[in-house]
Image: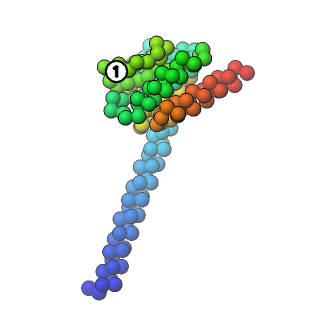
Amino acid sequence: MDPVTAAVLILFVLVALLLAAGAGLYRRVRELELATYRGVGVHVGTGGERSAGIGRPGATTIAVKINRRCPVCEDVLLAVGKLAADLPDGVGFTVVSDDPAFDKELPASVQVIRDPQVWRSISVPYVPALLVVDEQGVVLHTTPAGSGEIVSETVERVIARRKEAKL
C-alpha cells in the first residue's frame, strides 16, 4: 500500500473516531442538562410523606444534598454552619445525607436528615447539591454546590427574593 494512501486512511479513521466521541460527549452533556432541570417543580413535601421534612411549612428551605464520599462537602457544610446563624425568619437550611452516621457539627437551627431513602428521592444528578424549596415543598431551583461561595450566593438570592415577595 502506498504511504500516502495509508496516511489518508489512518486520518479518516481518526476523524471518524473523533466525530463519534464528540457525538457521545454532546449526548452526555445534553442528558446532564435535562437531568439538571428535572428536579425543578417537584413536590418534596413539608410533612406526612416519606420525604417529609425537606421543606418547612411557612418557610423557604435551602436543602443541601451531600454524601459520605464527597470531598467538597466539608467546605459546603462549613458555609452552611456560618450562614445559618444569620438567616432571617422564614429561611432555613436542611442537610440531607445518605450516611445514617452523619455527625458533623452544625448549628441547632440546621435540620439534618440522615435517611438514604430521602437522599435518593432528591433526583438531582450531582453531589453536593443545593435545592431551594418553597413554603409548599415545591423545588424552585437546583444547582451544584461546588463551594461555600455558591452556598453564600444562593442564600443571598433567596433572601433577596423573599424581600421582593413581601413588597
Mark 1 highlights which residue? 102
| Residue placed most toward the observer, 83 or 15 | 83
Q: Specify the amino acid type for callout 1.
A: Phe
Q: Residue drawn 42% across and 58% down? A: 23
Residue 4, picture quadrant: bottom left
Residue furthest to the right in view is 167
At label 1, counting other C-alpha atoms closer than 10 Å, the crowd grade (few under 14, some 14-19, many 20 or more) is some
Q: Residue drawn 33% across and 29% down? A: 68
Residue furthest to the bottom in view is 2
Q: Quadrant of the C terminus?
A: top right
Q: Residue drawn 41% across and 64% down? A: 19
Whole-percent x, y for residue 116 in the image: 34, 24
On the rendered structure, is 56 left or right of 164?
A: left
On the rendered structure, is 39 left or right of 50?
A: right
Whole-percent x, y for residue 80 in the image: 49, 24
Q: Residue drawn 49% across and 27% down? A: 79
Q: Is residue 75 visible?
A: yes
